[in-house]
Amino acid sequence: MPSNNDALTDNVDPKEIEKFSAMAEQWWDLEGDFKPLHMLNPTRLEYIEQGVDGLFAKSIVDVGCGGGILAESMAKQGAQVTGIDMAHASLQIARLHALETQTELDYQKITAEEFAAQHAGQFDVVTCMEMLEHVPDPASIIKACCDMVKPGGFVYFSTINKTFKAYLMMILGAEHLLKWVPKGTHEYEKFIRPSQLLAAIDKTTLKCEDLCGVEFNAFAGEFSITDNVNVNYMLRCQKLA
Ligand code: SAH
């Protein structure tokens, strides 16, 4: 995986942050730009919950939390969740929504790397979903996630594979034909092959325990877990004790 972060002080692409800030009002609109994430959420929540033997009382940090779709759902299961993101507008929406739903969780505007430096080895679980394909140096985020979690704790990643099918589904289909998400939401160049993600994970003390695909079933109108990692995929890692 390229490490092209040398020229940047932060591993943050300001264009990406502007893009998500401009969409922030839509985070909790079930029919809006983030509809696919709302549809995906029950499937990924269950995957996370099963892999860590329940979320109750677990300390979790959700890296690149956006408007809090996943973060809030984990807090509702009794986890103590901190959501971090660099888009102020998204965090404001996330905080308002948590107030409305009376869910207790903490949101902070901070980079993954800085948060990791402040909270080394403190969390039971780290989640970093649909975020790596939006940063200049994904390997640096992976390392930061590893640094945040306790020895023996779990880290979850999800992202988009760099395949022709992913280009067809995520860019041509979702952005241009179906107009599910705004044009420019994803860039093919930033999609990440599982082998690249695993190579970056191998450079840390994380060990990948499970890798699975996530597939949209147009008839059922829902996502489900599959062996096929052609487009969207997720994985669970454990930090070596
Ligand atoms: N994880 C959430 C949101 C995914 S959208 C979910 O799956 O529901 C990608 C998110 O990553 C956006 O909220 C964007 O603001 C955030 N992001 C992009 N670059 C970031 C960075 N360098 N640091 C923190 N967050 C970042």
Image (tube, helix red, strand yellow):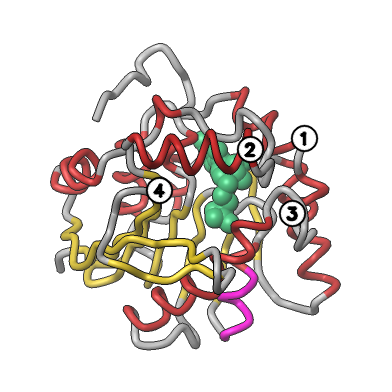
Q: Which residue is mark 3?
A: 27
Q: Is residue 110 visible?
A: no
Measured in 3D between alpha carbons, the distance from the residue under mark 4 to the one under mark 1, in whole angstroms, is 22 Å
Q: Earlier in the sequence, mark 2 or mark 3?
A: 3
Would you place residue 12 above or below residue 48 in this image?
above
Q: Tag 4, which secondary structure?
A: strand
Measured in 3D between alpha carbons, the distance from the residue under mark 3 to the one under mark 1, in whole angstroms, is 11 Å
Q: Residues within 10 Å of mark 2 (few under 14, many from 20)?
A: few
Would you place residue 101 above or below residue 204 in this image?
below
Q: Which residue is mark 2?
A: 177
Measured in 3D between alpha carbons, the distance from the residue under mark 4 to the one under mark 3, in whole angstroms, is 19 Å
Tell me the residue at 31%/52% (across/down): 147
Tell me the residue at 40%/74% (across/down): 48
Q: Tag 1, which secondary structure?
A: helix
Q: Residues within 10 Å of mark 4 (few under 14, many from 20)?
A: many
Q: Nearer the viewer, mark 2 or mark 3?
A: 2
Screen quadrant of the C terminus:
bottom left
Q: Earlier in the sequence, mark 4 or mark 1?
A: 1
Identify which amino acid the numbered label 4 is placed on: Thr
Which region is colored magenta? 72-77
**At which x and y percent is residue 78?**
57, 85
Q: In the shown orientation, is residue 32 left or right of residue 190?
A: right
**At which x and y percent is residue 214?**
39, 62
Q: Which residue is mark 4?
A: 159
